[in-house]
Amino acid sequence: MLCGLIMAGGKGQRLFPLSTEKKPKQFLELCEDNCTMIQSTFKRLCGVLPVERIFVITNEDYVQLVKEQLPELPESNIIPEPLSKSTSAAILLSVLHIKGLNVEVKNIVIIPSDHLIGNEEKFCESINIASQFISNNKNPTVLVGVPALNPNTAFGYIKCVGVSELKELQVYKVEKFQEKPEPEIAKLFFESKLYSWNTGISVWSINTLLESYIVHQPVLYKQISDCFENGVEKVRLNHVYNNIESISIDHAIIENLENCYMIQAHFDWDDLGSWSSIERNLFKDKMNNILVGDIRIVSSSNSIVYAKEKPVILCNIDNLIVVETDDFIYVGNKDDHTGTNRNPNLC
């Protein structure tokens, strides 16, 4: 039996000031479906799983936001994390929490909360095929890959064994996995036509996942599992989180796996983690502007504007990001907005 885990603990700093530490991007309506990112992810998983087998891990500061945006989710299915220490610790904490509930599940699909996915029918089919493959084989892990459309350095890349043409919804043995390569390497990967983008979606046997931590991250496994000796010991867990390493599951576990597979899926996919990804996916007017809210344009182009309440008038400007927040109005050059040049005092 399959369960699902939505990863919703990130702070979305590259999308500042739209995404802030107080309300990060997974809790925002970034697309045009009148749903926040986490709501869209939840609805997508409901196409595969019943609500009682869907779990969310998030920073303890965001638990109330999860409750408000996913009121149908049982409270016991919301897993609070003391601090953000990347995905390796978050996933281990979640799996131990799920096992502690004595839920009758064997497999788990792990999915980020802030990705844009089109063709949800193919998404559901991919997850079901991956889960069936795991149930019928010994201790595999299945990553979900999609065709690489360009040499993007923001994504991980997967190469499969002895494959010259990846066919849709087939499962292949992984030969090589590399997270976020340098530009020249990404260019080589893309031009070879042998690599797929890693969507960050993975399907595991829960036992295999825990065994992988024991083998590849024994210290982390002991630190967090010891907190579950007598139920969840919150004070002890807080202390552990203050001292553990922040490392992604890609580097901690997946890069070390020998029995790793990939299913090739052909649904539309993107990680809405930056302003450039917003620009790739939202509707543009004839002057190449993305306008959300009451915006009036006079001879302006190539800009991204989000207005909450007040009307915004653009006159003879180009290549700007303009965002109205509850506290201030931000104006910045689009090319300079890397997500690292923000003023932390504004968050």
Image (cartoon, rainbow, N blue to C red):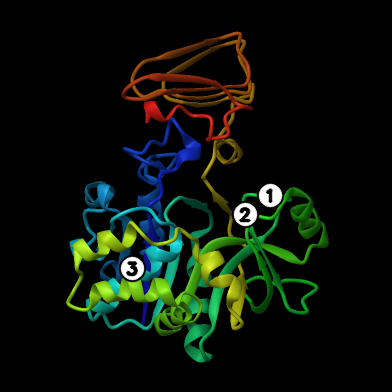
Q: Quadrant of the N terminus?
A: bottom left
- For the residue pair 205 and 185, the one nearer the viewer reads as 185
* Residue at mark 2: 155
Q: Quadrant of the C terminus?
A: top left
Mark 1 touches mark 2? (CB < 8 Å): yes
- For the residue pair 33 and 51, the one nearer the viewer reads as 51
Q: Residues within 10 Å of mark 2 (few under 14, many from 20)?
A: many
Q: CA distance from mark 1 to mark 3?
A: 31 Å
Q: Is residue 151 above or below residue 258?
A: above
Mark 3 touches mark 2? (CB < 8 Å): no
Helix, strand or loop at mark 1? loop
* Residue at mark 1: 152
Q: Is residue 49 visible?
A: no
Q: Is residue 207 visible?
A: yes
Q: What's the residue type where badge 3 is placed?
A: Leu
Q: Is residue 139 above or below residue 25?
A: below
Q: What's the residue type where badge 2 is placed?
A: Phe
Q: Residues within 10 Å of mark 1 (few under 14, many from 20)?
A: some
Please state the horizontal and vertical placement of residue 212, each as a whole percent of the image.
48, 80
* Residue at mark 3: 93
Helix, strand or loop at mark 2? loop
- Residue at image position (33%, 56%) is 242
Q: What's the residue type where badge 1 is placed?
A: Asn
Answer left or right for 208 relative to 178. Answer: left
- Residue at image position (33%, 60%) is 241
The earlier-in-sequence mark between 1 and 3 is 3
Question: Mark 3, mark 2: which one is toward the viewer?
Answer: 3
Q: CA distance from mark 3 to mark 2?
A: 25 Å
Q: Is residue 169 above or below residue 36?
A: below
Q: CA distance from mark 1 to mark 2?
A: 6 Å
Please state the horizontal and vertical placement of residue 197, each as a whole percent of the image.
65, 60
Please state the horizontal and vertical placement of residue 211, each as a whole percent of the image.
44, 83
